[in-house]
Image (spheres, rainbow, N blue to C red):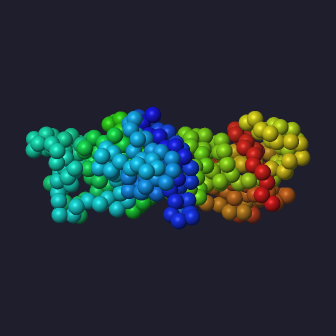
Amino acid sequence: MWLELQDVVRAFGSRRVVDGLSLRLERGSIGCLLGPSGCGKTTALRCIAGFEAVDTGSIRAHGQLLAGPGFAMAPAERHIGMVFQDYALFPHLRVSDNVAFGLHRLTGDARARRVAQILDSVGLSEYARRFPHELSGGQQQRVALARALAPEPELILLDEPFSSLDVELRERLSIEVRTILKNLNTTALLVTHDQQEAFAVADLIGVMQHGRLEQWDVPYELYHRPKTRFVADFIGQGVFIAGEVIDRSAVQTELGVMRINVNSDWRPGDRVELLLRPDDVIHDDASSLRAEVCQRAFRGAEFLYSLKMPGGTRLLSLVPSHHNHQIGEHIGVRIEPDHVVAFPRQD
C-alpha cells in the first residue's frame, strides 16, 4: 500500500477536525478527499504533508511511518510534493527557474535536463523563459504542478488546485492533470469541494463530513450505491421519496412498488426514503403516470425538469431538449431505477 492512514485524529482543543480517518491508496492511483468547507479534508492533507501533527493514529507512505503519536517525520524528508490553491510561484523567477527551485541537489546539466523533461510532460516547453505574470491561470497551475513533480516525489498532494479558475478552464485542466499524473504513474491525493472535479481526476473518492470519512469508493459506487444519506445527498442530484417496506427487498411508494438492489435488514412496516436520480425518471408520453412540470433548467442537450406527482412527491428528470415542455404542463413519466437505495425516513 503506497499511502495508508489508520484512525488518524487531529484535534484543536476539544474539537476533532479529523476524526478517525482511515484510507488506503495504491501506487499510481489518484485519490480525492471531497466534502463541504470545514469537513476536515485540508487538515487531513496537512497532516500527511507534515504541516500538522497527528494526535492519534498513523500515516504511512511508501512503506515508511510518516506520523504517529509522539513521532513526526520532517516535511522535507517525506518525499511529498505539494500543489497549493494559490500556485505559490515565485513572481521574479522565470518558469524554468520556478520548476528548478527544488532541484538544488542536481548538477547544472542534470537540473536543466530534468526541467526540460518535466515542462515537456506538462506541455509548457515553449514557456520556459516566461515569467508567471505572462501566463494564464491554467498555465500557472501547470507550472506549480511541474515544480511539485520535478524532484520525483513519492506522493503529490493537491489542495483545491483549480478553485481560482473559471468553470470551463477548471474542467479542462482537471482532465489534463489526471492525464499528466497517470502518464508519470504518480500517486496523488487531491482535496476539493467540487464533485465534478473529483470525478474528473480521481480513481477513488472519500466523502467527508465533520472530520469523518463517510465513504471511500470509486465514483460509480458513490453515485449509485451511497452508503449514507449524506453521501447520497452530497453526490450528484436526486430526490428522496417516501415509502414503506413490504419485505426485505420491496418498498411501496406513491410511484408503485420498487425493489431494493442490495441486501438489507429492513422489516415490513419500516418507513424509509428511496433515492431517485434524474436519470431514473424517464419521460414517456405513453405512460399513465403523469407529473406536473414545476421548474425547468435548460442544459443544451437536455432539460432538467422538476416534477410534482399528484400525491405531492417531487422528482427530477433529465429529458432531451427537443422535449420542450412548459411550467404547468403535465407529462408522462416512467420510473426505471437501476439502483434503489433506502435510508431511514427523516420526518
Residue visible at 75% across and 35% down in the picture: 263
Name, please, the residue furthest toward the left: 108
Residue visible at 61% across and 54% down in the picture: 234
Q: Is residue 203 left or right of residue 260?
A: left
Say which quadrant the C terminus sits in: bottom right
Residue visible at 35% across and 57% down in the picture: 84
Say which quadrant the N terminus sits in: top left
* Nearest the eye: 170 or 160: 160
* Nearest the eye: 62 or 170: 62
Q: Is residue 231 left or right of residue 106?
A: right
Q: Is residue 185 left or right of residue 15?
A: left
- Determine whether 110 is above or below 190 in the image: above
Q: Is residue 322 visible?
A: no
Across and down, in percent, residue 295 comes to 68, 63
Across and down, in percent, residue 123 comes to 26, 45
Q: Is residue 287 visible?
A: yes
* Nearest the eye: 94 or 61: 61
- Determine whether 121 is above or below 272 in the image: above
Q: How many marks do you count on the picture?
A: 0
* Nearest the eye: 18 or 84: 18
Name, please, the residue furthest toward the bottom: 13
Across and down, in percent, residue 314 comes to 75, 57
Across and down, in percent, residue 283 comes to 71, 47
Q: Quadrant of residue 105?
A: top left
